[in-house]
Image: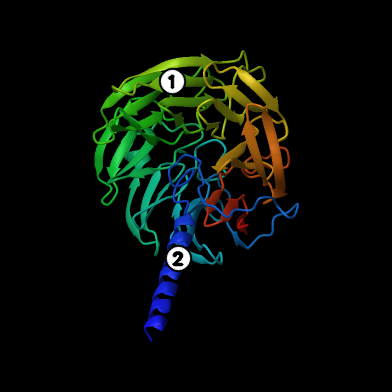
Amino acid sequence: MFRQVRQAMFLTAILAIVVVSTAAHAEDWPQWRGPNRDGVWTETGIVEKFADKKLPIQWRAKIGAGYSGPTVADGRVYVTDKLTEPKQVEQVHCFNEKTGEEVWSYAYDCEYSISYPAGPRASVSIDSGRAYSLGAMGHLFCFDAASGKVLWKKDLKAEYAIEMPIWGIAASPLVVGDLIYLQIGGRGACIVALDKVSGDEKWKALNDKASYSAPIMVQQAGKPVLVCWTGGSIAGLNPANGEVYWKLAMKPSRMVINVASPIVHDNRIFVTSFYDGSLMAKMDDKQLTAEILWHEVGPDEQNTKSLQSIIGTPYFDGKNVYGVDSYGQFRCLDATTGRRVWESQEAVPRARWSTIHMVRNGERMFMFNERGELIIATLSPEGYHEISRTKLIDPTTAQLNQRGGVCWSHPAYANKHVFARNDKELVCADLAK
């Protein structure tokens, strides 16, 4: 009898370890660029190579047009879109992660006065059972993430006298602690912090124009710092009250076109813009100051020096920066100097504004290009090495009515699946080994 009890206890312990281990290796994608907003996907047990030239789709859900990438949390997938008939509305959708069945959907009137009017840009951010959606014209909603009930809402354009960017509001909300941080370009309120539960304003900062780049939170000199790349500067703010710790000027030569997120490694910050090249800055590790290390700009958009990206956020490993240039040239830069190490045209075809989104998983990079292809590759100073490639979703023309359309929205990687959208559908595919 004692032996049977001991065996049962042993099996229960083993089962608990398996359950905990499985949970530890499962990972949601609750915000822009993943759990830590850094383009890193830590799940294991992921496919080594694709078996077919077209990835089998687990489910499809019909949606409208838009640039916002999907997010995944607590068994649900969130995405936004826009409809033009019978009237212009933005929509926020929630789908079952396993089946693709609609859980809830919310629509609100929203007439666009911006260029590239396909739909919303910002990904929905999920935190503590709430879903935060920011529309292209500045409509901010806080939903109960499970039911879709509106907990609070704001018309930021009206409230903050936003000087609307030509492409609308695009930076995905960042939720850290008790606050939600937004880049909106309001009067004296380029950056705004709100209480995440009530929506009440906690502070506002900077008189810069808005860019399209999502803010990030970093650690500097033992303190949290909110890093914001606006339409005129790279700034480090006190996340508690908006105090400007440091500010580095980076004024646009032609127009504000900052889309990629800042990327950080060992107190260095890298940003890249289509017209204004690449800039590397360094945050002091003992005091709250920063300085520019180098800034490289080519003579024009077709004759670039380092990296002049438009949409895709590069990858920075500390020694090298990898990213796609203005016409689809995939490049490796020496992070110390900005000097080009190599260039390849394999990842995405040559085209103006050509785009690819990168997510690191272990030693490999999962790369989703604008042709709707998913690529597994490794990147090093020696070159681009492609392991496998498959078709995930078809390009569509609402986002860009050129070259047969594009897929410009960042995919989500969650619970060993990939979730991607175009202007017609949201798809889910299994990436488990």
Q: Which mark is residue 19?
A: 2
Instruction: Pick whichever, 338 or 277, lies toward us.
Output: 338
Farthest right residue in view: 53
Q: Residue at x 60, y 15 (%)?
A: 298
Q: In the figure, 413 relative to 274: above or below?
A: below
Using residue 300 as the reference point, say whether residue 126 is left or right of it. left
In this rendering, does residue 79 appear at all? yes
Furthest residue in direction top, as rendered: 299
Residue 20: x and y in percent read: 43, 62
Secondary structure at numbered mark 1: strand
Residue on which the image places disc 1:
281
Q: Position of 258 compared to 138: left or right?
A: right
Q: Residues within 10 Å of mark 2 (few under 14, many from 20)?
A: few
Is residue 395 found left or right of 28 in the rendered image?
right
Give the x, y percent position of residue 363: 58, 40
Which amino acid lies under the numbered mark 2 shown in the image of this protein? Answer: Val
Point out the image quarter for the C terminus: bottom right
> Tag 1 or tag 2, which sits nearer the N-term?
2
| Residue neighbourhood size for the residue with mark 1, other residues' Cα within 10 Å, grouped as few (<14), some (14–19), many (≥20) | some
The kind of residue on which mark 1 rests is: Ala
Res 163 quadrant in image: top left
**Residue at 43%, 60% in the rendered image:** 74
Residue 427 percent across, percent down from the top left: 61, 57
Nearer to the camera, 196 or 30: 30
**Residue 98 in the image: above or below residue 301:** below
The total number of labels drawn is 2
